Image: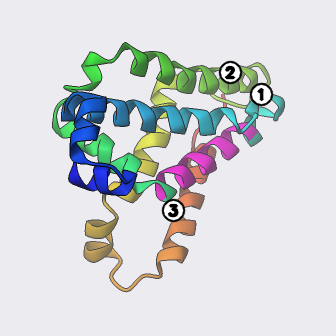
Amino acid sequence: MEQIAEKAGTTKRMVVYHFKNKENLYLLALEHVYTQIRASEKELSLAGMPPVEALVHLVESTFDYHADHPDYIRIICMENMQRGRFMQQSSYLRQVNRSALELLAGILQRGKEKQLFNQTVDARDLHRLISSFSFHYVANSYTFTLLFEDGADEQAQRQHYRKMAVQWRSAIPCP
């Protein structure tokens, strides 16, 4: 709270007055980070792109968003460590995050109609796959790098994993 007050140029008392308690502030921060990532996805204008191009662009953008917003990853890690305690209190979070699956479902449907994607691929499962790869890159970067990539160039590694995040798509053959 002290850091928030200091960065906002106000007092801790004013922060508490406005948000009532730390839990409300945390929940609003959680809602904010999810709102931001979903807004960034909407800005991609993927509906007008061919399905494969749209999916590639979404994967690249998701990977970049995660890499460029490590605080997003940190707050999600904290919420997971608390077993989703605060997320359960917010109907807004379910509502705002529906767009992630709707976006993917639209891309998949267009691709399936053109026989570009496997008919069994599910939007929720694909979202988990994209998110997990992007999330892992940021959340485990220190330990993974120290254990397996000591001395690796950070930018080169980022580009390598970004490319990998897209290339998995070629491993899912269309029937």
- The answer to whether 35 appears left or right of 91 in the picture is right
| Mark 1 secondary-structure assignment | helix
Dot 3 alpha-carbon crowd within 10 angstroms: few under 14, some 14 to 19, many 20 or more: some
What's the distance in space between the residues labelled 1 and 2, CA to CA? 8 Å
Amino acid on which the number 3 mark rests in the picture: Tyr
The answer to whether residue 122 is visible is: no
Question: Given this view, does label 1 or label 2 mark the residue nearer the observer?
Answer: 1
- The answer to whether 149 appears left or right of 117 in the picture is left
Queried whether the magenta region covers residue 105, the answer comes back as no
Question: Given this view, does label 3 or label 1 mark the residue nearer the observer?
Answer: 1
What's the distance in space between the residues labelled 3 and 1, CA to CA? 26 Å
Rendering quarter of residue 140? bottom left
Queried whether the magenta region covers residue 58, the answer comes back as yes
Q: Is residue 149 above or below residue 42?
A: below
Query: What are the residue bounds of the magenta stretch?
Result: 54-67
Residue where numbered disc 2 is placed: 106
Q: Nearer the viewer, residue 23 or 45?
A: 23
Q: Are marks 1 and 2 in contact (CB under 8 Å)?
A: yes
Q: How is the image coloured?
A: rainbow
Residue where numbered disc 3 is placed: 161
The answer to whether residue 31 is visible is: yes
Residue where numbered disc 1 is placed: 47
Q: Is residue 153 above or below residue 23?
A: below
